[in-house]
Image (spheres, grey):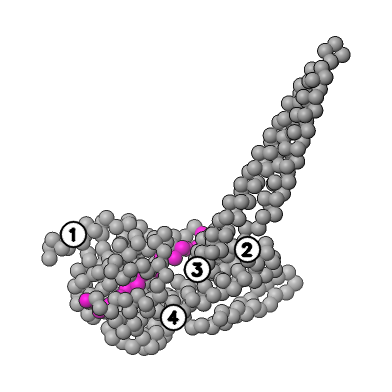
């Protein structure tokens, strides 16, 4: 046991230092309930690897092993690609493994200037949520002060008690994760027609996406490939046009500078005059073609869809995200605003 603990401690130290600071052993143990020390836990990092979920899940596994409060900690390497897998699908894939708890970890970007946030959700083998936590990278996980996460209490009872105590429940953690990762537009794409602005992640679209990244995220690789081709053509045409403008301007400038040395005593020869005329025409044509290419580059659209279709892709993605987290399909939020000379109420409906 001593050698195992030593190896676990070394793994804990080798983990990402920021995430290692977030997953404190005693705090994690508070989410394991009365059966702590008897549970077999599978830690599944879900989502794109670039989000930092790999580092976070490794630090979480190391912390669990170092705590000596579980009999077995497994990773999710045997479950295949989990980048796009929903929680319930991950639990289903782990049904044959020798664990009684599945801890699914997802990492989401934080607001500007803030670190990423990890959200972990405990499930039993029957796919029932048993508890959840959320923690910012580098900040210590707060111990659970409500009912034990896996003490066999029905989920309805857990949620009710947590709500009465004013503590975040499983639904709150998932809703918070959804708000961090859903796609939103800073302005209505419909009002801009074909010149719509790309959406961003978070409630206010703080983390703006790139064009190809957006299309890949919503599952439209065809549009991503088209965007890259259009973007490449736009850049190439603009660069070629600028090169033509510069070359034409230099040619015409050289001819004009050379003409300054013409005097009454040294007039240009006929051949030189013809040479200058040819150079001026070539420079003018090159400059004009360059201007046309720059204008053409500016007119090449980066997107092949309009704002209405873009909104539809975002809505479809957000609906799937809500389903993955087990959130209700429709919610309504009432807000307000103040403006010069008055104010009003706003109603946001999520389908």
* Chain-order first, disc 2 or disc 3: 3
* Residue 298 pos. (x, y %): 68, 52
Judging by the rendered image, the residue that carries numbered circle 2 is 304
Between the residue at mark 2 and the residue at mark 1, the CA separation in whole angstroms equals 54 Å
Q: How many neighbours does mark 1 have within 10 angstroms: few (below 14), some (14-19), or many (20 or more)?
A: some
- Please name the residue shown 15% across and 63% down the image: 4
Q: Quadrant of the N terminus?
A: bottom left
Judging by the rendered image, the residue that carries numbered circle 3 is 219
Q: Which residues are magenta?
A: 98-112
- Please name the residue shown 65% across and 67% down the image: 306
Res 7 label? 1
Between the residue at mark 1 and the residue at mark 3, the CA separation in whole angstroms equals 41 Å
Residue 294 seen in this snapshot: yes
* Residue 254 pos. (x, y %): 73, 26
Between the residue at mark 3 and the residue at mark 4, the CA separation in whole angstroms equals 20 Å
Between the residue at mark 4 and the residue at mark 1, the CA separation in whole angstroms equals 37 Å
* Chain-order first, disc 3 or disc 4: 3
Q: Quadrant of residue 299?
A: bottom right
* Residue 275 pos. (x, y %): 77, 24
Give the secondary structure at mark 2.
loop
* Residue 151 pos. (x, y %): 27, 83
Between the residue at mark 4 and the residue at mark 2, the CA separation in whole angstroms equals 33 Å
Give the secondary structure at mark 1.
helix
Q: Nearer the viewer, mark 2 or mark 1?
A: 2
Judging by the rendered image, the residue that carries numbered circle 4 is 326
- Residue closer to the observer: 108 or 297: 297
Q: Quadrant of the C terminus?
A: bottom right
């Amino acid at each position: 046991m001593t050698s195992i603990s030593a190896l676990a401690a070394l793994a804990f130290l080798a983990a990402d230092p920021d995430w290692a600071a977030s997953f404190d052993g005693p705090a994690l143990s508070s989410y394991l309930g009365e059966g702590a020390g008897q549970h077999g836990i599978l830690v599944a990092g879900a989502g794109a690897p670039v989000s930092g979920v790999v580092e976070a899940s490794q630090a979480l596994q190391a912390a669990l092993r170092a705590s000596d409060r579980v009999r077995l900690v497994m990773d999710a390497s045997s479950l295949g690609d989990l980048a796009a897998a929903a929680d319930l699908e991950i639990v289903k894939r782990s049904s044959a493994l020798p664990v009684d708890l599945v801890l699914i970890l997802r990492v989401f970007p934080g607001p500007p200037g803030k670190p990423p946030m990890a959200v972990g959700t405990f499930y039993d083998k029957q796919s029932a949520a048993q508890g959840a936590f959320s923690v910012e990278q580098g900040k210590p996980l707060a111990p659970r002060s409500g009912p034990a996460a896996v003490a066999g209490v029905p989920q309805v009872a857990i949620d009710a008690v947590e709500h009465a105590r004013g503590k975040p429940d499983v639904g709150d953690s998932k809703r918070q994760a959804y708000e961090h990762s859903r796609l939103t537009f800073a302005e209505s794409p419909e009002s801009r027609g074909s010149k719509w602005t790309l959406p961003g992640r978070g409630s206010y679209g703080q983390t703006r996406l790139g064009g190809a990244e957006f299309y890949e995220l919503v599952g439209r690789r065809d549009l991503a490939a088209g965007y890259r081709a259009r973007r490449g053509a736009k850049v190439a045409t603009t660069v070629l046009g600028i090169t033509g403008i510069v070359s034409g301007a230099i040619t015409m400038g050289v001819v004009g500078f050379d003409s300054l040395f013409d005097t009454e005593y040294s007039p240009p020869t006929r051949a030189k005059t013809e040479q200058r005329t040819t150079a001026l025409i070539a420079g003018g044509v090159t400059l004009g073609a360059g201007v046309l290419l720059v204008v053409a580059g500016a007119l090449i659209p980066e997107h092949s869809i309009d704002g209405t279709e873009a909104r539809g892709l975002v809505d479809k993605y957000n609906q799937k995200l809500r389903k993955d987290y087990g959130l209700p399909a429709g919610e309504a939020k009432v807000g307000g605003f103040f403006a010069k000379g008055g104010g009003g109420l706003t109603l946001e409906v999520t389908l």
